[in-house]
Image: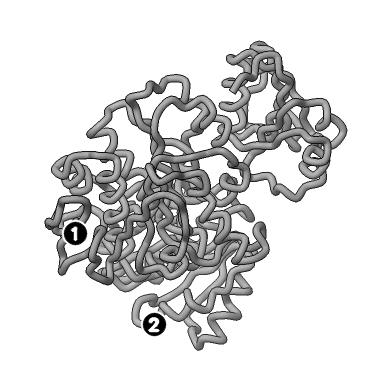
């Protein structure tokens, strides 16, 4: 992509927006960085950007200036239905995301991971597998590292592993990973995408540009995943069934039946991550490693050495026989259900947050025999409380803050219990993001006497 002397607008001053603006500036573009927030409410330092020659347009949507540009880079957090987006499209101004921009400059193969749940853990695990094989592998995307921040350091022999959300897929057009993964598809982000059909369409689009020389790895146990179509070679994994070809659980052994290999890889009970969802993540990651040509022993050792990522059933502390787990990454009911099912101890559960128009019935129905008490917080607390009453679960209470939730949960816990932050909701009503929520949870837990 030749951007020299092109006028380019970057919408959003989050980390990926700033990284995109800097990349474009280094490539000779005339860059304007825009954000709806005024300067005094932004976390990013603006002076260095201006010193580098990046213009700023803050405190307003870019409706009045949008047609002045040759290209717009849009943050995944900005809905594509906003008026300025439509105005740009009508004027013939291309709008792409940061992932699409980075792809245009990327010299090496890409493994791209999407799905409703398990993306971050699987991306990190594939990243460890690939780093053991290709040390200069970059692990980027929705996992927290902007792709554009790393792309210029890559060579043709390197590899990229990227986590891709449905928001990011909305603004990708030519993006073509060598290996794509769709881990699972359950209802999520319907406040943004409106229909389940649109959400499925976006997930499938990760493979829309792939060819017969590429791979798409799919969950055979998920009916929506199993039916996805692509020109790439489809490779399946299954926790529940033996496969004629693919990656599956054979007793307690992760088994490979792929190309000319038909052998057990490892005993899943020896992994450092636990729960059925972790087995599925390991199967998917093993498939990605094999499709990339990583030797079997390298794949095995990387999986055995892997530990839980931050905010995903992350052990935080044990205090007086009570274990605390941070699962702030569980921003939907399906992820929160998996966490409940993974726990080995009786649970004091902390839930609630921003309402993404979810139905909480299936989540509450998993409480029986597992959750001793539920602590509710956030704007959706009363909706969850109503669901609890409808499901005849009455052991819940409401609190006003995360600190109060931690204190209340510890007060209810007995020796041998666990306190689990697994909100089943996004964090945006009370926090900047799920990472902030998780780190504050850990801070409050570590303050307990």
Q: Earlier in the sequence, mark 1 or mark 2?
A: 1
In the rendered structure, the answer to whether residue 416 lies left or right of residue 326 reads: left
SS state under label 2: loop
SS state under label 1: strand
Q: Position of residue 211 (x, y in %)?
A: 44, 44
In this rendered view, identify the residue nearer to me: 162 or 276: 162
In the rendered structure, the answer to whether residue 62 lies left or right of residue 228 reads: right
In this rendered view, identify the residue nearer to me: 42 or 195: 195
In this rendered view, identify the residue nearer to me: 334 or 321: 334
Q: Is residue 197 above or below residue 364?
A: above
* Residue 73 visible from this viewpoint: yes
| Marks 1 and 2 close (CB-CB < 8 Å) | no
Q: Which residue is mark 2?
A: 368
Mark 1: give few (<14), some (14-19) or many (20+) Cα within 10 Å.
many
Q: Position of residue 73 (x, y in %)?
A: 66, 33
Q: Residue at x 62, y 47 (%)?
A: 170
Q: Position of residue 31 (x, y in %)?
A: 70, 20
Q: How is the rendered protein coloured?
A: one colour
Q: Is residue 362 above or below residue 319?
A: below
* Residue 408 visible from this viewpoint: no
Q: Which residue is mark 1?
A: 254
Outermost residue to the right: 64
Q: Position of residue 239 (x, y in %)?
A: 28, 66
Q: Is residue 382 above or below residue 249?
A: below
Q: Residue at x 55, y 61 (%)?
A: 200
CA gap between label 1 and label 2 equals 30 Å
């Amino acid at each position: 992509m030749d951007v020299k002397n092109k006028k380019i607008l970057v919408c959003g001053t989050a980390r990926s927006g700033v990284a995109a603006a800097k990349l474009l500036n280094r490539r000779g573009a005339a860059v304007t960085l825009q954000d709806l927030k005024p300067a005094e409410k932004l976390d990013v330092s603006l002076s260095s950007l201006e010193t580098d020659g990046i213009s700023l347009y803050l405190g307003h949507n870019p409706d009045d200036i949008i047609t002045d540009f040759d290209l717009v880079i849009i943050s995944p957090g900005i809905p594509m239905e906003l008026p300025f987006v439509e105005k740009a499209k009508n004027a013939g101004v291309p709008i792409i995301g940061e992932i699409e921009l980075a792809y245009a400059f990327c010299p090496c193969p890409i493994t791209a991971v999407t799905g409703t749940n398990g993306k971050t853990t699987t991306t990190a695990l594939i990243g460890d597998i690939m780093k053991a094989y290709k040390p200069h592998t970059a692990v980027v995307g929705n996992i927290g590292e902007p792709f554009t921040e790393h792309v210029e350091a890559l060579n043709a022999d390197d590899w990229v592993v990227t986590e891709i959300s449905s928001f990011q897929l909305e603004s990708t057009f030519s993006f073509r990973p060598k290996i794509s993964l769709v881990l699972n598809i359950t209802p999520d982000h319907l406040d943004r995408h409106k229909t389940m059909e649109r959400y499925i369409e976006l997930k499938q689009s990760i493979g829309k540009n792939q060819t017969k020389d590429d791979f798409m790895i799919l969950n055979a146990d998920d009916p929506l995943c199993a039916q996805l179509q692509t020109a790439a070679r489809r490779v399946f994994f299954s926790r529940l069934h033996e496969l004629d070809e693919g990656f599956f659980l054979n007793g307690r052994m992760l088994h490979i039946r792929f190309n000319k290999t038909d052998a057990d890889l490892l005993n899943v009970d020896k992994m450092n991550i636990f729960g059925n969802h972790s087995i599925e993540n390991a199967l998917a990651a093993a498939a990605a490693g094999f499709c990339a040509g990583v030797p079997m022993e390298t794949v095995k050792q990387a999986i055995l050495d892997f530990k839980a990522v931050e905010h995903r059933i992350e052990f935080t502390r044990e205090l007086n026989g009570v274990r605390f787990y941070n699962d702030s990454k569980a921003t939907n009911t399906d992820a929160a259900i998996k966490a409940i099912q993974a726990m080995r101890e009786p649970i004091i559960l902390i839930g609630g947050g921003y309402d993404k128009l979810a139905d909480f019935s299936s989540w509450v129905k998993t409480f029986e025999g597992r959750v001793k008490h539920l602590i509710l917080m956030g704007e959706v607390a009363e909706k969850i409380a109503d669901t609890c009453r409808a499901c005849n679960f009455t052991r819940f209470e409401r609190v006003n803050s995360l600190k109060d939730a931690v204190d209340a949960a510890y007060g209810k816990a007995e020796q041998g219990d666990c306190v689990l932050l697994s909100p089943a909701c996004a964090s945006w009503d009370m926090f900047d993001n799920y990472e902030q929520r998780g780190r504050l949870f850990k801070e409050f837990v570590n303050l307990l006497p």
